[in-house]
Each structure stands twice: as C-alpha cells, then as structure tokens.
Amino acid sequence: MSQGIWNRLQMIDRRIIYWVLFIILMIPFIRPLGLPVSITDQTRDLYNGIRSVKEGEVVVINISSGVSAWAECLPSLVASVKVLNQQKAKIIFWTSFVDGQLTYEAIVSKVPSFKERVYGTDYVYLGYYAGAETGVAQLAKDIRSVFTADYKGTPINQLPIMQNVNKAEDVKLVLSSDTGDVCDYYIRQWRVPYGVPVAEIGIAMIYSSYQPHYKAGILFGLSNGSRGGAELEKLVGELGDATTTMDAINSSHLLVIFCIVLANLGYLATRGKK
Amino acid sequence: MAYPTDVVGILGIWSALLLMLMIYSYPLYKENPFFRFAEHLFIGLALAIAVITAIQTTMRMAVTPVLGGDIVYVIPIILGFMMYFIFSSDYRWVSRYPIAILVGSAIGLGMRGVIIPNILTQIINTITFPKSTDFMSMFNFVYIALGTLFAVMYFLLTYEHKGAILYPTRLGRWLIMIGLGAYYGNTVLFRMSMLSGRAQYLLQVLRIIPM
C-alpha cells in the first residue's frame, strides 16, 4: 500500500507542481509575510562604498542586464542610485545590452529624486556600446572614441557632466549590473590597470562566481540578486520590490525543498521494489 | 510606476500580460498555437531590435567618423565586411583574418587583466591567515585552503587515484559536487526570482496589488 502511495507521488504531473509553484509565488505579494532579511558583509560594503562617494564625483553604472533580469537586478540598481542621488554624485549610465535603455528608463522612473536632478549635468545615459571586452577597454582609455553623443543625440562635448570626464581615472567607481561576465571585463580593464573600484550588482546565478573576487578585495561590494536588493532596500531605509519578492522566493524555496525531500523519500521507499 | 491611464499604456500592459500567459501556457498546459505565436513574435522582435541596434552602432562608431574625414575607420568596416565571406564555401578563408584579429585582440586584452585578479590575488587570499579568528573565519580559511588543494588533486589525471591520493581526490570530488550544488542552488534562486517578477506583474495588471 505504502509503495503505491510513493509511486503515485513520484508520478505527479509536473504541470501540477508548476501551478502550485506559481500560486505560492503570488500569495506573498497579496499578503506579505515579512520574513526577516539579514545584511551580509558584501552588501554592506557595497552600500558603504556608494556612501563614500562625495558630491560631484563621477560614478559609472554599466547596465549589462536586460528586462528579463529586472526582478533580480533592478531593485539593487534603484537602491544604489537613490544613495548616489543623496550623495549628489554625477552618474553616467551606459549599456552593453540592446534593451539596456528600458532598464535605464525604469531606474529613472522608480527614483523620485531624479526630478531634482538635471539631465546632462547630474546624470546622463550614453547608450549602447558594442565590442564586449574591447569596448570596455576602449571606454577606460577614451570614452569619446566610443560615444560621440548621448542617446538623445546631444554631442558628448555639449554635456556639462562630461566636461572633465573621458577616461577611467576620471571616474570614482563603477557599478556593473550583469547577467553574465561583463563585470570581469571591468575588473580586467578598469580595476586592474587603473585601480578604479568596481562592484557587482548581479543575478543570483553568478553570485558564486564573483564571491572569490569580493573575498580577495578585487570587488569592493557585491549584491546577490533579489536578496542583495532586499538588503540594500533595508540599508537605504526604503523597502521596495525586492523585499516583497524575497517573501515570494522564500515560499517557493520551501516548496522546492519539500519536493526534493519527498522525491528522495519516494526513491528510497521504492528502491529495489520495482 | 503607476497604472497607466492612457489607451496606449493600457493596451501595452495587457498585450504584455497576454503574451506572457501565451508563453506560460507551454509549461502550465502543453504546446499550443498561442505559445508558438508568442515565441515566434518574441524571437522576431528581439532579432529586429538587435539588428537595428547593430546598424545604429555601426553608423555611429564607424560610418559617421569616415564621412567626417577620419579615414582610419575604413579598416574595421572592411574587416567587418570580410566576416560575411564565411557564407561562401569558396572564399571562406577571407573571413578567417577578421576572426583571427578579433580572437587575438580579445585574448591579448583579457590576458593583461587575468593574472592579478584571477590567479595571484586568489592564491594570496587562499593562503593568507584570516584577520578575524572567530570560528566561521577559521572554518572558511581551512575549508577553502584544503578544498582548493583537494579539488586540484582530483584533476591529477596522470596518476591513478589510489594509495595516498585516494581519499584526498575522493574528498576533492565531493567538494566539487558541493560547489556545483551551490551554483545550481543560485541558478534556481534566479529562476524563481524571474518567475516571481512575472507573478507580481500578473497581479499588478489585474489591479490586485498596486503597480
């Protein structure tokens, strides 16, 4: 009898599990659970690094994460930019993703303090650059050889923010938001040759890859997907999308753990009985 | 971001929701014409955006400077055109030159920054005694040091894994599996996060939660 139950449990249609997962993910958005989020060292260091930027210093935000990664990267970017605006830093956005402009526009729409800042003077979006690591290396040497104008077509020399900025040494720090390995390019082409501090705002999938770089002091900070975003929101003092998302993710993980335990129990119970 | 009030905005968010549901109809139900329509539409749009961006970038970074008298940019334009010989069986060899330049420059650029962060700093960090002497710092120090040693020993493929290196290599294999498990766990975390974003969007469009 028990063998029958285990066999039936192992043969549950995967679509049922997907439906249950989708419904479980939705519940915390309707009724937040408010599960606690502790602050990790790498997120605190990222926050402190951004906090150390002084008024008028230039920060580059490299957007190498598309719309598909908004749930993971956007909350961290929004929280970071809120701090940079508080610090009155000058922010240069650029992207290596074809849909990077949508991410830039989402950041601007989600950070109310941009209304008090002047485009072209306090912040600018230069657009898309090609060439992967070659492009990143060229940006470190001569930004004007890659971008002649911003995304609106305004010549770069007419933008007040770019008056004294043309190479890596003119930049205080780089925040790279990635779904891949673009942060490696900034480590190799900005951090190592020019000593520009670099931090990673990445998806959870690449967190393990960049953890050694953070531990070794190559990256000054590291944000781990939605979890990092929730931590930054807590540090900034404005809870947002990532905090709610963490409840949903935690709930889904409980389901995944339950399924793994159940599957293994089923395997052990039916092993050798077929 | 507030819920749109104009017709275009409302049409936009409902179109996105319908396309999302069409895509999810595959895992939640089965393959069907709606899924295929949404999939093909997505691929077509993504390709169109990529092509337009590529053309704009080429115009901005190469063609405009050439028209402005900066003749040196003719070289990358010619190299770019040479790439297309890859489609000709008779003249495929022409495409090997720009590919060789591309690969060579990428390796050269990459190499100059690899040694310090990826090799030297990692070795120094692995063998440096931790500043803090609390239990977790010491555990991490020993775990990483021995883990690195045993995992590297696992790849000693010129020696049979028996005798003195039997248990270290076996432990190395276990540590590699734990590491890959952590990678996979983070991958699951990422996928769940993406899915939660879509679940949130569904509730926002249906006005169950604020946008």
Image (cartoon, coloured by chain):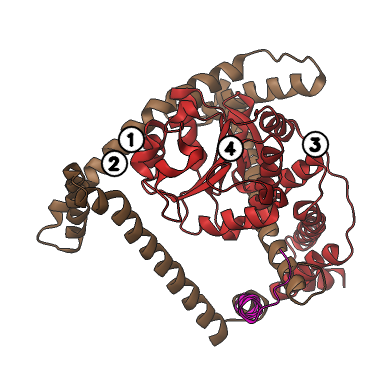
Chain colours: A red, B brown
The chain holding disc 3 is A
**Label of residue A90 in the image:** 4
Q: Nearer the viewer, mark 1 or mark 4?
A: 4
Label 1 neighbour load within 10 Å: few <14, some 14-19, many 20+: few
Task: Check if mark 1 and mark 2 are on a common chain.
Answer: yes
For label 4, count other residues whose C-alpha is less than 10 Å away and answer few (under 14), some (14-19) or many (20+).
many
Give whichever of A69, A157 is nearer the camera.
Answer: A157
Q: What is the spatial separation of the Cα atoms under label 1 and label 2, in whole angstroms?
A: 6 Å
At horizontal 72% and vertical 61% (from top left) the residue drawn is: A272
| Residue at the image point whose x is 60% and y is 23% from the top | A216
Please check the rendered image and state whether residue B19 is part of the magenta-colored stretch, yes or no.
yes
Instruction: Please report the bounds of the magenta region as a residue range.
Output: B1-21
- Discs 1 and 3 lie in a common subunit: no
Say the numbered circle drawn on residue B107.
1
Give SS at disc 3. loop
Q: Are marks 1 and 2 in contact (CB under 8 Å)?
A: yes
Mark closer to the observer (3, 4): 4
**What residue sits 56% from the left and 31% below the top?**
A173
Image quarter hosting the N terminus of chain A: bottom right
Identify whether B34 is placed above or below A178. below
Amino acid, disc 2: Val
Residue carrying label 2: B103
Q: Which residue is mark 3?
A: A39
Q: Main secondary structure of the magenta part?
A: helix
Kindly indicate whether the residues beneath marks 2 and 3 are on one polypeptide chain: no
Q: CA distance from mark 2 to mark 4?
A: 35 Å
> CB of mark 2 within 8 Å of CB of mark 4?
no
Query: In this rendering, is residue A267 above or below A123?
Result: below
Asked if B15 appears above or below B97 in the picture, the reply is below
Q: Write down the quadrant of residue B86 in the picture.
A: bottom left
